[in-house]
Amino acid sequence: MLRTRRLRKTESIRRLVRETKLSVDDFIYPLFIEEGVNIAKEIKSMPGIKRYSIDRIDEELDEVVTLNIPAVLLFGIPSDKDDTGSETWNDKGVIQQAIKHIKEKYPNLYVITDVCFCEYTSHGHCGIICDNDVDNDATLPNIAKQVLSHVRAGADMVAPSGMMDGTIQTIREALDGAGFYNLPIMAYSVKFASSFYGPFRDAADSAPAFGDRRTYQMDPANRREALTEAGYDDYEGADILMVKPALSYLDLIREVKDSTNKPVACYNVSGEYAMIKAAALNGWIDGERVMMESLLSMKRAGADIIISYFAKEVAKVLARK
Ligand code: PBG
C-alpha cells in the first residue's frame, strides 16, 4: 500500500516536504491616494482599507516599510474629472505628488503606478469615448502621456490596466524614446470584465456612468483568448504578465505561467478581499486561515507576485511563524 500519511505525521516533516511557501517578498500592497488634506477614510466594503491624502499616507507607509513589503501599487483619486481624464498626465496631479513624496521619504520602497483613466474620467470609462464606446487608438497617446508623467515623477514601474490593444508597444516606445529604457512594465494582460471589482469601484470612485467594460475587458468564459492576450503582451515587451482577478482564474494563472518565462503576477481583487472579510466578521470562517489558504493557492497556481489588500496582514502572520 502507498503510505502517503508517513510524511504528514508531524509539523516538522510537513515543513520539510512543503512544496509552496508564501513569503512577504511575494506581495505588492495597493494604496488609494485621494486629492485633498487630512483624509484617512475607511472604505465601507473593504474593512481595514482606507483612502489617504498625501499628508496622512505616512501612517500607512511606515507600517508597509516596517513589515518589509517590497512594493506598493498606487491608485489616484483626483478632485477634478473630465471626459479625457487629463489629470492623469498633470505633472502636479495627485499621483505624481504622491510618487515624489514616497520616493523622497522611503527611497527603497518600490513604487508601481496603475495606469488607467476610469478614476479620472467624468464617465468612468478607461479611455476616450466615441460613439458610446471607448476608442482604442484615440486612447493610446494619452496612455503614453500618463506613463511619462508618472515616470518623470519617479515611478519605478508602470502597470497599465485599461485593456486597450497595443498598450504595451505604445508604452515601451514612449519610455524608450524618452530614455527610460530600463523602466519595466507590468501588464494587466489577462483582465476580465469581473463583478469582483465592485468594492474597488466604490473605493476609487471609478464605476462607469453608462454601460459596462465588456468591450475592452475579457469575457470570463475565455481561456484561449487569455493566452492570446498574455502572449501578445509578452511579445510587445511586457516585463511581468498579470492575471486578474485571481481566485476564480487560478487555471489561467497556471496556463499563463506555463506559456512564458517571464514572472507572472495575479491581482487578488477587492471582491475577493471583501468576501473573506465579511464572512470572518460574521464569525462564519476563520479569516486568517482562509486568507492564507487562498493566497497560497495563487502561489501554487504559478503566481510569482501577488497584489493583495491582505499584504500587511500576511506579512504579520509570516513574521510570527
Ligand atoms: C482600473 C482598475 C480596476 C481595478 C484595478 N484597476 C477596476 C476596474 O477595472 O473596473 C480593480 C481592482 C480591485 O477590484 O481590487 N482600471
Image (spheres, helix red, strand yellow):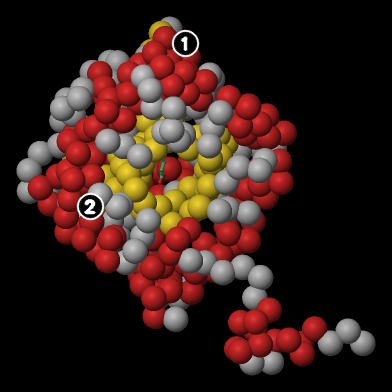
Does residue 134 show up? Answer: no
State the separation of the CA atoms marked 1 and 2. 37 Å
Q: How far across and how far down the image is residue 51, in percent?
A: 22, 48
- Could you tell me how many numbered marks the image carries? 2
Q: Residue at x 15, y 27 (%)?
A: 92
Q: Residue furthest left?
A: 37
Q: Residues within 10 Å of mark 1 (few under 14, many from 20)?
A: some
Q: Residue furthest top?
A: 131
Q: In this view, does 216 lie to the left or right of 270?
A: right
Whether residue 107 is situated above or below residue 299 in the rendered picture: above
Q: Which residue lies furthest to the right in this view?
A: 1
Q: Residue at x 46, y 18 (%)?
A: 173
Residue that label 1 marks? 137
On whether ligand 1 comes within 8 Å of the CB at mark 1, the answer is no
Report the quarter where the N terminus lies: bottom right
Does residue 56 show up? Answer: yes
Whether residue 26 is situated above or below residue 317 in the rendered picture: above
* Amino acid marked by disc 2: Tyr
Q: How far across and how far down the image is residue 270, in percent?
A: 40, 50
Quick one: label 1 or label 2, which is nearer the N terminus? 2
* Amino acid marked by disc 1: Asp
Residue that label 2 marks? 106
Q: In which quarter of the view is residue 227 placed?
A: top right
Q: How far across and how far down the image is residue 144, in percent?
A: 38, 19
Which is more toward the observer, 11 or 206? 11
The numbered disc on residue 72 is: none
Whether residue 27 is situated above or below residue 89 in the rendered picture: below
